[in-house]
Image (cartoon, rainbow, N blue to C red):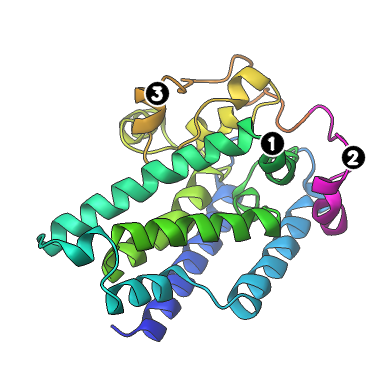
Amino acid sequence: MNLVSSINLISALPLILFLLLLVLQSLFPRRDLSRVGQRRGWHNLFLFAFNFVLLRFLIPLTLLSTANWALANQLGVFNLIAAPNWLAIVVTVIVLDFAIYWQHVATHKIDLLWRMHKVHHADHDMDVTTAVRFHPLELVLSLLYKALLVILLGAPLAAVIIFELLLFIGPAFNHSNLAIPARVDAALRKMIATPDVHRAHHSIDINEQNTNYGFFLIWWDRWFQTYTERPAAGHRTMSIGLVSQESECERVDQMLIAPFLKS
């Protein structure tokens, strides 16, 4: 599979799943979405479209091209040591997942990063469109961080493809408003972040907000004691969002300028 085909694959599969989740969460909703009538979902999608154009066409950097460059220049751990390809793929995906966990923690602990990340948390409902609601500056910094990790690891192209797919599919799934049977959720959350797991992270309660950081694997939250089993107010009645962001972050223009305003 060449680089162009790989990029097309990464673009197509997540889009299909995203559309599927949009349908499924409307058929089997976990919560009533109080702000659907205010078109919040459309503004989230408009921001996603803006970010897609920015990252796809204006910034000439992708993780696949970075991995290809590292391979051509024999940079990074797995380009310098002999290791079975399957092992290099598994280790790379797990290490990148671990790194994104700590990146997420940092966005909540460092004020400069939080100013950008709060755009994501200022959504007062949570559904699959929340998964693509990120400030472009946060996405650019995240891309540079991940590109550096890909170089240091000498990440195999197959590992980067898998990671990129998980990086979209994981958040699309765990931000969705899809009702999942309790037994299925209990089984899944032993390994990955489910919608009920991640919803607690979007709680208006700051103590719950500072938990359940994992974007795909839930191991790190369990191991580093940042795991919350369920929101105290219950999934159907809990409040989502930020206390100080009641009205200033609903439209795309408000999302774009939010990091530059005083909280």
Q: Position of residue 96 (x, y in %)?
A: 37, 50
Q: Is residue 36 above or below residue 80?
A: above
Q: Is residue 101 above or below residue 134?
A: above
Crowding around mark 3 (Cα neighbors within 10 Å: few <14, some 14 to 19, many 20+) is few
Could you say whether the residue bearing mark 2 is in a helix, strand or loop?
A: loop
Give the CA separation, mark 3 to mark 2: 34 Å
Dot placed on the residue nearer the N-terminal end, 1 or 3: 1
- Magenta segment boundaries in residue numbering: 243-263
Q: Please identify, in this view, whether the residue under mark 3 or under mark 2 is nearer the observer.
A: 3
Q: In the image, what residue occupies the spot 46% across and 74% down?
A: 12
Residue designated by label 1: 32
Taking depth in this image into account, of 209 and 110 the one nearest to the observer is 110
Label 2 is placed on what type of residue? Answer: Ser
Label 1 is placed on what type of residue? Answer: Asp
Residue designated by label 2: 247
Crowding around mark 2 (Cα neighbors within 10 Å: few <14, some 14 to 19, many 20+) is few
Q: Please identify, in this view, whether the residue under mark 1 or under mark 3 is nearer the observer.
A: 3
Taking depth in this image into account, of 24 and 203 the one nearest to the observer is 203
Q: Position of residue 228 (x, y in %)?
A: 49, 20
Is disc 1 in contact with disc 3, using a CB cutoff of under 8 Å?
no
- Determine whether, in the image, residue 262 is placed left or right of residue 72: right
- Determine whether, in the image, residue 18 is placed left or right of residue 188: right
Residue designated by label 3: 224
Taking depth in this image into account, of 146 and 240 the one nearest to the observer is 146
- Determine whether, in the image, residue 227 is placed left or right of residue 36: left
Q: Position of residue 260 (x, y in %)?
A: 85, 47
